[in-house]
Structure formats: structure tokens, C-alpha cells
Image (tube, rainbow, N blue to C red):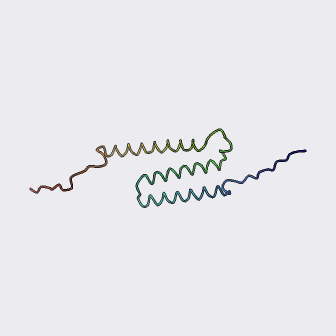
Amino acid sequence: MDNVQPKIKHRPFCFSVKGHVKMLRLALTVTSMTFFIIAQAPEPYIVITGFEVTVILFFILLYILRLDRLMKWLFWPLLVFALVTAVCCLADGALIYRKLLFNPSGPYQKKPVHEKKEVL
């Protein structure tokens, strides 16, 4: 007697519930990043939201290409997080270098508030 295993029907990621939820999350995060940019929010808000957009996009590509099932020996979230973190650190270092290059004395130069100008 043959044991017939029921064949699991493969559903493309883009048409699954999990795919719809991840796409909706990506759209929501991109929208919030756009609003942060338009409102000229502090840079950390924009950077953190951009980091989240990048991670979500990598996971969507991972699931679309079915790489999670191809290489089971690799812990994908750790790899993706490490790569994105390295890229963000390099970008942050470049931005800090550029900011210090154009303003070597530092970002703040405090002057006394009650300093009076002498009139000659």
C-alpha cells in the first residue's frame, strides 16, 4: 500500500495573506517616512524609518525569491540585519564626516545673550 502524501499547494507570496500584510506594512512605513521628510522632523526619525523600510523591503524580496526555503542553513534575519546595519553605519559615518568637514568648529557656538554692542 502506497502512502500518498497530500501535495501542499504552493501559493505565490504576493497573493498570500502574509504577503499582503508585509506589503501593507511597507506602504505604511514609506508613507510615514514621507511625512517625516515633509514635516522636516529630526534626522533620527527619518533614519530609523528609512532603516525599517530597507529591512522590510529585503524581507519581501527574500520571500518573493523563496530564498528562505532554498538555504535553510542560513539565519536570514541576522544576515539581513547585519548587512543593513553595516550600510547604515557607513552612510552615517559619511554624513558625519561631511558635516564636520564643512563646519570644523562644531555645530554650536554659544554667545552671551546679554552681550551689548559698543557704539562708537
Q: Is residue 18 left or right of residue 87?
A: right
Where does the image place residue 46, in percent across and percent down from the top left?
45, 54
At x 65%, y 45%, the residue is: 68
Total number of numbered labels? 0
Residue drawn at point x = 45 percent, y = 58 percent: 36
- Residue 75 position by quadrant: top right
Question: In this view of the protein, which residue sits in the foreground, 92 or 44?
Answer: 44
Who's the residue at 38% across and 44% down the image? Answer: 96
Q: Could you tell me residue 3's position as x and y percent?
A: 86, 45
In the drawing, does residue 74 fall left or right of residue 114?
right
42 left or right, relative to 81: left
Q: Name the one closer to the observer, 105 or 78.
A: 78
Relative side of 29 to 44, left or right: right
Residue 14 pos. (x, y %): 66, 55
Q: Quadrant of the N terminus?
A: top right
Instruction: Residue lying at the far top in this picture: please name it.
Output: 73
Q: Quadrant of the C terminus?
A: bottom left
Compared to 86, does 119 lie above or below? below
10 is higher (above) or lower (below) than 39: above
Q: Residue furthest right?
A: 1
Residue 51: percent from left, percent from top: 50, 50
Residue at x 43% of width, y 52% of height: 44
